[in-house]
Image: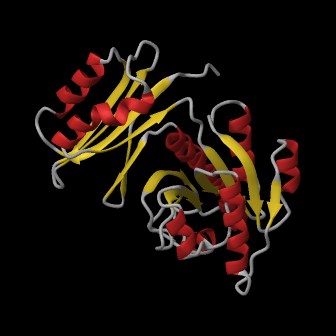
Amino acid sequence: MTMKNTATLLINSPDRKGLVAAIADFLYRHNANILHADQHQDAELNLFLMRVEWDLQGFDLPVEQFEQAFSAVAERFQMRWQLKTSAKKPRMAIFVSRYDHCLADLLYRHQSGELQCDIPLIIGNHADTARLAEFYQIPFHVIPVTRETKAEAEAKQFALLDQHDIDLIVLARYMQVLSPDFVMRYPQRIINIHHSFLPAFVGAKPYHRAFERGVKLIGATSHYVTEDLDEGPIIEQDITRISHRDQLEDIIKKGRDLEKMVLSRAVRWHIENRILLYANKTVIFD
C-alpha cells in the first residue's frame, strides 16, 4: 500500500457558528490541501465534532509548532482537540486466549498492509496460538492468569506493554476480565470483541444463551473497554440470521465470522483516527 503523509485533526467542542470557517481558514493560511473533512452536531448536547485530514506536502507549519499556532482558535471556540500524523504508526499489542480466528484475521490484515500499525508483541494466557504468532514472526509471551495470580500476571503484562511503548491493546477473544487498574492505565485504548449484539447477552457464553432463547439473529460487537463489563462505547456491530435448524455449533461457527470482521473494522478505524468518543458513544467518520 502507498504510504500517506497526512495530518488528521479531531475536534470536540461546544457547537457555535463559525467553527468550520475558522478551522478551514487556519489550514488555508498554512497552505493545507484538505483531503477529507467530516463533521457531526449533537443538538441535544450542543456538541460539534469534526475530523479533517490534509496532505502535509506543501503545508508550511511544522507539526511540532501546530499546538502553539492553533491555540488561539482552539481557545476561542473552547475546543478539545488531537492532532495525529500518518508518519507515526501506532504500536498495538494483541491479547488472546485459545481461539485464534480474530488473531489470524488481524495478523493477515496487518501483513497485507490494511492495518497501518506496528505489532511488537502478542500476549496469551495460553500457548495455543503461539505457532500462529511464530508464522507471522511476532514475539509471543505466555502469561497464565488465575484468580489467585491475576495481580501478578497483570504486573508482568504492564512491564511488557511499557517496554514496547504500546499505544493500543486489542483483546482478540481474550477470555479474561481486566482489572479496574488495568483499564485505568489505558483509557480509550483497549478494544474488545464481544460475541453478541450488545446490549443483549452480556458476559459469558452469549451463544449458549442465544441458542437457549431461540433468537433468529446473532451478532458481534466491538467496543472500548471500561470498568463496567461490556458497557464501553460501541465502535462497530454486525449481525447474521440463523434458523431453527442451526444447532449451537452452527451458531458459534457463524458467529466467529462476524467476530473477526467486526473487530478488524474497529481496529482499522481506531488506527486511522476515525473515532471520536462522547457520552459513552462513538462517532465514526467516513
Q: Nearer the viewer, residue 239 or 166?
A: 166
| Image height of 279 relative to 257, above or below | below
Quadrant holding the N terminus: top right
Q: Is residue 247 visible?
A: no
Percent position (x, y) of residue 150?
69, 79
* Residue at horizontal 68 percent and vertical 40 percent from the top: 118
* Coloring scheme used: secondary structure
Q: Nearer the viewer, residue 160 or 233?
A: 160
Quadrant holding the C terminus: top left
Question: Looking at the image, which residue sits at the far bottom?
Answer: 148
Left or right of 82? Residue 122 is right
The quadrant where residue 35 appears: top left
Percent position (x, y) of residue 14?
18, 48
* Residue at horizontal 57 percent and vertical 62 percent from the top: 194
Q: Nearer the viewer, residue 230 or 168?
A: 168
| Image height of 90 relative to 18, above or below | below
Number of numbered discs overlaid on the protein picture: 0
Q: Is residue 245 visible?
A: yes
